[in-house]
Image (cartoon, rainbow, N blue to C red):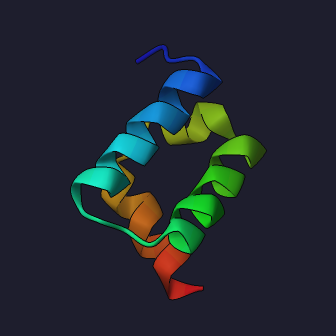
Amino acid sequence: MDMSDAEVKKFWRDYCARRKIDAEIVARGDAKIDADPDFWADQEMQELLDLVKAG
């Protein structure tokens, strides 16, 4: 799916907001998205959440 960097980040943030995820975790996910937005555009947000929660 073709998504802009901003769209990927919005999707991530909305996903976290619905689950009431802590702002620190959201920020760590933002950093992962910034590092490789094309990769994260093709992944499930739960995968990103699991990754950043693990450390």
Residue positioned 71% across, 55% down in the render: 31
Q: Does residue 42 appear left or right of residue 46 in this picture?
A: right
Question: Is 40 placed above or below 41 here?
Answer: below
Residue 34 at x, y percent in the picture: 73, 43
Dividing the picture into quadrants, the one containing residue 27 is: bottom right
Residue positioned 31% across, 48% down in the render: 15
Q: How many marks?
A: 0
Residue positioned 58% across, 39% down in the render: 39
Residue 25 at x, y percent in the picture: 53, 71
Residue 51 at x, y percent in the picture: 50, 72
Image quadrant occupied by the N terminus = top left
Question: Is 53 placed above or below 35 here?
Answer: below
Q: Residue furthest bottom?
A: 54
Q: Residue furthest right?
A: 35
Question: Is 14 placed above or below 48 here?
Answer: above
Q: Does residue 17 appear left or right of residue 5 in this picture?
A: left
Image quadrant occupied by the C terminus = bottom right
Residue 41 at x, y percent in the picture: 49, 32
Q: Nearer the viewer, residue 55 or 20?
A: 20
Dividing the picture into quadrants, the one containing residue 9 is: top right
Residue positioned 63% across, 46% down in the render: 33
Dividing the picture into quadrants, the one containing residue 11 is: top left
